Image: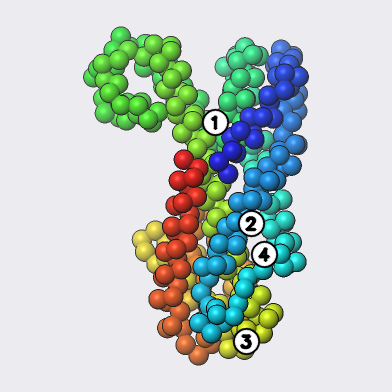
Amino acid sequence: MADLADVMSSLVDDPAVIRDIKAAMLRNDLAGALRAVPLDKLPKALESTVSGHIRDTFEKAADLAPLPKAVAASMRFDVTNPRAVEYISTMTMNAALQIQQDAVEGVRAIIRRAFVEGMHPYEAAREIKNLIGLASNQVKAIANYSNFLDSMGERESLMGIGQGAMDRLKRAGVRGVGSLSLTPDKKQEFLGRYTARLIKERAIGIARTLTIEESNAGQNELWRQAEDDGLIDSRLWQKVWIAAHDERTRPLCGALHGQRRELNGTYPDGTGMPPRHPNCRCREGLVKRSDAKELLPIHAQVAAKVAKRIEKAMRVLG
């Protein structure tokens, strides 16, 4: 996922695309400017990046999944299993389409801002190239930050601007700005740093969501393969939902805690497995029908390993 931004910006590297965007802007044609950005090519362009991340996480999660000791000694996860291959393919397509949908909304927000602020067509095309891939709320955050920097640029010095304004300036990741005057070059530097930070956050957010989804899916697939191979008897074992159970746990997750289902079953709300929502920290465990107690220490170890896996993915992105 580290090259997500490169994949996005490559869509508008073609001079013909830039030319069409400029032409639409000169005609005051918002819809035409949006059509000029070849976002329909995005799912295909993202396929190898997203698929590789999904397959890797899916397989690693299966390696870490809890199994009875006797089963673990005999079980070998097969990522080429037709069901696993179909799942990875479907998830790759769904993830790419979701990223595409978010990108469309982001580009629409950039173009709308360009029309409202009366940007020169060349500047608007440059904005699309720099910001493509960001969600619409992030595009709005950059516009707000740009306006804030403009207001700061009217001051002779940044001394005495107040802690709130200083904290906002530091969103760009710079320090020691107290005695500076905000020249146009400095504004572009700050805005560029802030934009880079949001692009990184966007990539990390996508990677985190995929990692959480696939870590649970890989675990489920391992259990189902063990059942197919006769290593787990579904008459003796079930899966159980385990919520984080702290002050950050949402009520909808807490309500599912301890709920048991068949290995390929769904929970009362129709959910097949975590995550229940973005940034959901819930997991599943394997438990004997007669005793849920043996699950918890096993699951705690697995959750710690999965958390390290997510942190490693984020460090790679950084």
Q: Secondary structure at mark 4?
A: loop
| Amino acid found under the numbered disc labelled 2 | Arg
The reply to whether residue 255 is in sight is: no
Looking at the rendered image, the disc whose residue lies closer to the viewer, 3 or 2, is 2
**Of pointers 3 and 1, the one earlier in the residue sequence:** 1
Q: Which mark is residue 149?
A: none
Disc 2 and disc 4: Cα gap in Å?
8 Å
Q: Are marks 3 and 1 in contact (CB under 8 Å)?
A: no
**Of pointers 1 and 2, the one earlier in the residue sequence:** 2
Question: Is residue 179 placed above or below 40 in the rendered structure?
Answer: above
| Amino acid found under the numbered disc labelled 1 | Val
Q: Are marks 3 and 2 in contact (CB under 8 Å)?
A: no
Looking at the rendered image, the disc whose residue lies closer to the viewer, 3 or 1, is 3
> To which quarter of the image does residue 108 belong?
top right
Q: Which x, y percent locates residue 268?
A: 59, 73
- The residue identified by callout 2 is 55
Q: Which mark is residue 139?
A: 1
**Of pointers 2 and 4, the one earlier in the residue sequence:** 2
Disc 4 and disc 3: Cα gap in Å?
21 Å
Q: Which mark is residue 233?
A: 3
The reply to whether residue 54 is in sight is: yes
Q: Residue at x 60, y 15 (%)?
A: 123
